[in-house]
Amino acid sequence: MRANLPPPNKRLGQNFLIDPNIVRKIVALAELGPSDHVLEIGPGRGILTEALCHAAGRVTAVEVDPRLHAYLETRQAELPNVELVCEDALAYPVESLPMGTVVVANLPYYISTPLLFRLLDQRGRFPRMVLMLQAEVADRLVAKPGGSDYGVLSVMAQYAADITKAFRVSAQCFRPRPEVASAVVLLRTKEHTGLSQQEEVAFRALVKAAFAHRRKTIVNSLRDEGYDQKHTAEALTQLGLSATARAETLSLDHFVELSRLISVGSNEIA
Ligand code: SAM
């Protein structure tokens, strides 16, 4: 017999999908087969979990809410290939999952950005991810230079993956209805990014520092974050960019090259 469904907890971002058509579209986008292992974050009441169990070989479903975890356990017989884990996804050791795991999730929006960074940090393990996000976050993920959506999230995510915004999802497809619009994105992670692990650390720090003072030029923003003003200006010139350029006008390739040039410059001085 099924346990009673616990009422939604707003604090945990519990807006449950109720539209089977959206579930089908999400699963189709993940291109799953019987040999695939799936990580689902926040299975909730299990609408997506059930479809994933049919499409994939094995599903690991990590849910933080013990009430929902207990509810899903009552459905274990219907979902024989799911491993139910009751844990905060931000603490779950994703590195214990098999290489090639596909991530499919209607993410809890209040932690979607740290979760995304955590998954991208382990991108060698996850060839693709199909994620439902707040539409505003999806717009930032695919943003190109020049617009107000373009920032640290855009550069760091596009560095790690090729990203497509697949479709928007109306608030009517959830219960309770979320107050924000939603969208589904497909991320195909990159095998090669052109930077070593050590260079990547410097790149990450540079991108954060470049956007730390959005209204300033990149030279001044980096200076305020401890970078040598002269080196930055010289590196920008080498890249054919103006010394008065702002971070939001630089492409991903510009940031990668700038990071390389600045690291070389600071090594020479040291
Ligand atoms: N997958 C279900 C669906 O599509 O109907 C539920 C999606 S709901 C937007 C987000 C789910 O993530 C909820 O079940 C919530 O309890 C769970 N959740 C929230 N914070 C979490 C965390 N830190 N770790 C794991 N799951 C979390």
Image: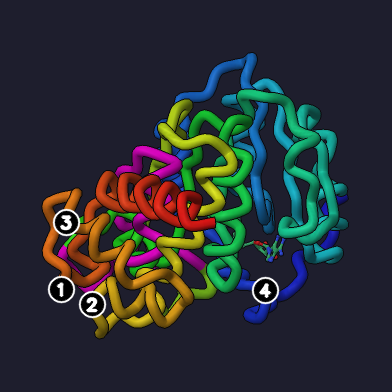
- On screen, 180 above or below 58? below
Label 1: which residue? 244
Left or right of 38 in this view: 263: left
**Crowdedness near tag 3: few (<14), some (14–19) or many (≥20) residues, C-alpha within 10 Å:** few
Determine the CA span between mark 2 and mark 1.
5 Å
Q: Tag 1, which secondary structure?
A: loop
Q: Earlier in the sequence, mark 2 or mark 4?
A: 4
Q: Amino acid at mark 3?
A: Thr
Q: Earlier in the sequence, mark 2 or mark 3?
A: 2
Label 2: which residue? 217
- On screen, 166 above or below 133? above
| The quadrant where residue 103 appears | top right
Mark in front: 3 vs 1: 3
Q: Earlier in the sequence, mark 2 or mark 1?
A: 2
Q: Are marks 2 and 4 in contact (CB under 8 Å)?
A: no
Q: Earlier in the sequence, mark 4 or mark 1?
A: 4
Quick check: is 147 in the magenta stretch? yes
Residue 45 percent coordinates (x, y): 68, 56
- What residue span does the magenta drawing correspond to? 146-174
Determine the CA span between mark 4 and mark 1.
43 Å
Label 3: which residue? 237
Q: Amino acid at mark 2?
A: Thr
Residue 121 percent coordinates (x, y): 60, 46
**Residue 173 seen in the figure:** no
Report whether the residue tagged 4 is closer than 8 Å to ligand 1.
yes
Number of the label disc, if any, that sits on residue 12: 4
